[in-house]
Amino acid sequence: MAADAAKRVGDDSPSQSLLYNPEIRGYFYQAVTIIVVVAFIYTAVTNAAENLARANMTAGFDFLGNRAGFDIGQSLIAYSSDSTYFRALVVGLVNTLVIAFFGIITATIIGLLVGVGRLSQNWLIARLCTVYVEFFRNIPPLLVIFFWYKLVLDILPGVKESLELPFSVYLNNRGVFMPAPMFGDGSSLIVIALVIGIALAIGFSRWAKSKQMATGKQYPTITIGLALVIGLPLLTFLALGAPLSFDTPVLGKFNLNGGMVVGPEFLSLYLALSFYTASFIAEIVRSGIRGVAKGQSEAAHALGIRHGLTTRLVVLPQALRIIIPPLTSQYLNLTKNSSLAIAVGYADLVAVGGTILNQSGRSIEIIAIWMVMYVSISLITSLFMNWFNAKMALVER
């Protein structure tokens, strides 16, 4: 017995008690992880510095002030070949954000319609939506981009045979030519009126919701909101004497002159990313609707609510808490897939950065800029979607 007692005393020694302490083990593993990560970063930085020294090169971002020396076909801000590398990167970043913004909006609308359509009681609509999802979801996004660029837009007629659409819009294999708005003096007041209208519409919507929760009375929030958002800028526009004119495109001998053009590079990338991502969003919407208890729909139908209103007012609001988290991932995927723009010559952040890399040889700096920009966009998108998810969460009354 004395030997057993001594053994138990030995087993309860301080070193062994520390070894089996979960908190101590957690700190130990974290310390090891930090050491490994720091060692990896130190090795990578040291290796890069040695390679740069061997090639008689220096690291830094001072080259961004140098003259770019190349043109960019698609630019929403002022740019020329005499602009700096930094200005060129800003143009690429703006082009990336434009593709991501419009692509997300279009993909969300198409995905919502197709996702609801897959659950339609109409056999034809349900099967067509299923074919759409299975077709686009099982094709690489780069192939979808080439599909729109080569098989749809490239086979459009040439400039001389342009398809003339209403409102002086022309469609050909060089893109969509449309009238360009020319704003006159005082146009900034219209933008201010629009901002005020949006703020008033949001304020009224919140007030109407609080009143409905307190008294049960409903207010026409959509009608009044649209009246504020559209009516206030329109009244300002008319009060200023309609300071707006249009520069319409005119068909010349070899090209269309005047107006504005949306090139096939932008269109192919925009349509491809929108339709491709919408196929995944449609499945997210379908699974979210399926996740709502069937009794919710049955209760709404028992109250005499039509099927369409049941889906819009009962099912979808509850399905949002299931839809939003995976929807965020699809928004991030669409933004990152925009880097495939280089395949069709659209001047996004990666394409412009690649040109600068070839001219300056600053590969480390350019790759670092790419990483920081895409991480920043992803984090901002995630923060917004997390905020939206919290707003849409069910709250106990």
Image (cartoon, rainbow, N blue to C red):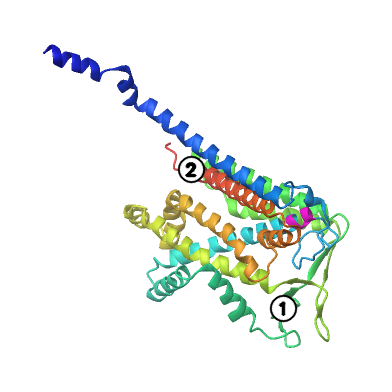
Instruction: Name the amino acid, label 2.
Output: Gly
Residue at image position (60%, 62%) is: 338
Q: Is residue 201 visible?
A: no
Residue 87 among magenta residues: yes
User: Can you tell which mark lies on residue 91?
Assistant: none
Q: Percent x, y for residue 121?
A: 37, 69
Neighbor class of circle 1 (other Cα within 10 Å; few <14, some 14-19, many 20+) is many
Q: Residue furthest top?
A: 2
Q: Residue furthest right?
A: 185
Residue at image position (82%, 60%) is: 79
Q: Percent x, y for residue 326?
A: 46, 53
Q: Are marks 1 and 2 in contact (CB under 8 Å)?
A: no
Q: Percent x, y for residue 327?
A: 49, 54
User: For the magenta stretch, what is the residue range?
Assistant: 85-89
Q: Percent x, y for residue 257?
A: 83, 77
User: According to the image, label 2 marks what residue?
Assistant: 216
Q: Quadrant of residue 355?
A: bottom right
SS at mark 2 in the image: loop
- 122 or 19: nearer the viewer: 19
Instruction: Name the amino acid, label 1.
Output: Arg
The alpha-carbon separation of the residues under discs 1 and 2 comes to 55 Å
Q: Is residue 167 above or below residue 282?
A: below
Q: Residue furthest left?
A: 1
User: According to the image, label 1 marks what residue?
Assistant: 174
**143 horizontally vs 27: left or right:** right
**302 horizontally vs 8: left or right:** right
Q: Is residue 319 visible?
A: yes
